[in-house]
Image (cartoon, rainbow, N blue to C red):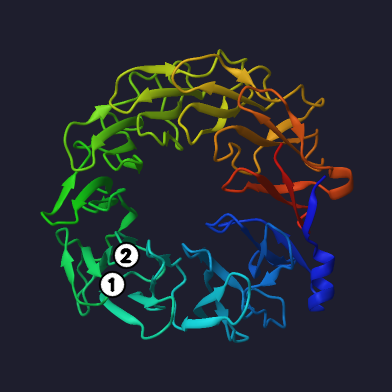
Amino acid sequence: GADLIQSDAGWQQAESNPNGNSASVVGESFARDRQWLLYVLERDDSDDPVQVASQSLSGGAWAVLNDDRAEDGGRDEGGSTLHLQVARNSELVVTTGFEDAPEDGFGRIGLYVTPIDGGFREPLDMDVGWWPFVLTPDSERVVYTSSEGHLRSVSVAGGPVTDLGVRIRPGFRHFVVLDSDTVAVWGSEPGTGTARLWKVALDGSGYTALSGAAPVGRAPTKLVAAPGGQHVIYRIDDRRLDQFYLYSASVTGGGQIQLNRHLQAGGDVKDFEVSPDGSTVVFRADQRKNNVTELWAVPVGGGRKTRLSRRLVGGGDVKAGFEISDDSRSVVYRADGRINNVRELYATDLDGGSRRRLTKEFPKGGDVNEFEIASDSSTVVFRADQETNNVKELFAVPLRDGKLIKLNNPLPRGGDVVRIGDRITPDSKHVVFGVRPKGRDGNTVLYSTNLRGKSMTKLNRPKREGTADQFRVSPDSQWVVWSANGDDVLRVRLP
């Protein structure tokens, strides 16, 4: 059976909270050493996280990592946590949260560092912007913006705050960490309204332009550092043509390079991802014909553009949410490639070589809802009404070659496989999923099975523990942790 990690009733008794809190496993749920679980406690009358708690997976008491100074239970309560990140050594948790909230609006946002097992909550800065901060790869410094959009860094050990000399539009995080010493940021120099891409030293010693100047108000919708930290990729609008283009800039200088071809009138780059090996950018764009979205690949530093999606049926598109395998060899995507408005699943080589359809023929009205690739790049797991329209089930298929397998046992009449968490365990051996009986109010049952669809095991007891709201699998693939009825956090060891 499952072990109770945290109970809402115990929380109310310990804190004498008249409003009541609910517990959920969200965000960065596990510390990087895999031994600590983090979860948030939310007020029942608010969508905002109030408290962050931690507990060792080996057992013991749970610890609250931030204060709750709220008196009115509203959105502006002091101590309400906005974002959190665990340091690499798993000894510290860095958070931002409201403090000293006035009655007529939001309070200041502070940046804090707390021992993961609880203790004094040390403020690093009390003038922090809304957007999430970033820890450097060595976990020694935090990079963030002030409430006015000034880029800053500070040591997790405390000490002076360093102003990095570049200003970002308030409310946006147009910066990415390149390494433990530098960041790339889209912003403007003090006293100017002209923005561009900069490489900035975190010790405040200076910054270097990586791109040409852009008009006032022009900013990327997405900014990514390619793995390896040698290129920055971004999608930005050309206000002259009202179209979105894709660019790459080398961190050694030389200016930006346009990665997509010339767009037809009305065309846009929709979205993009960088391969895990940092060599290739994959993007969706209606590049050749307006309103026909196709999938493309291009080297990260520019070069030959390869169309990955081949020919589409009239009215067909590549849908949002493609995924690149961890070995950087394949791309999996959904498209109505043969029949308009029927989303099928396809896999193609990243170099544009072989392509194959992963799904079988659908019943009328059937299609793929979502999918994910195993971390060993061997298998794709997807949810679809593959056999019966409006009956969502779970399937697995080898990425390269092999037979499609149904992973779930026969479902209760009117039941569906539902998505309440990432399904494939990090070791690529098991799949965890929820089954909900007919009706939205039915209790969700958690199951696990291996990728061959054998040894299906029930993980929870909904009649006793309540419905599973969401779950996470521990990084070592040993535990499944979930919240039940929004009140309790439970765990069970995978078979």
The residue nearer to you, when weighing 33 against 169, is 33
N-terminal-most mark, 1 or 2? 2
Disc assigned to residue 180: 2
Label 1: state its secondary structure: loop
The residue nearer to you, when weighing 6 against 256, is 6
Write the residue at 80% across / 34% down.
437
Residue 390, compared with residue 222, is above or below; it is above
Write the residue at 19% across / 74% down.
206
Write the residue at 61% across / 57% down.
35
Residue 277 x, y percent position in the rendering: 32, 40
Residue 306 x, y percent position in the rendering: 25, 28
Residue 96, compared with residue 452, is above or below; it is below
Disc assigned to residue 202: 1
* Quarter of the image where one finds residue 159: bottom left
Task: Farthest residue to the right: give it.
Answer: 464
Labels 1 and 2 touching (C-beta < 8 A): yes
Quarter of the picture holding the C terminus = top right
Quarter of the picture holding the N terminus = top right
Q: Nearer the viewer, mark 1 or mark 2?
A: 2
- Disc 1 from disc 2: Cα separation: 8 Å
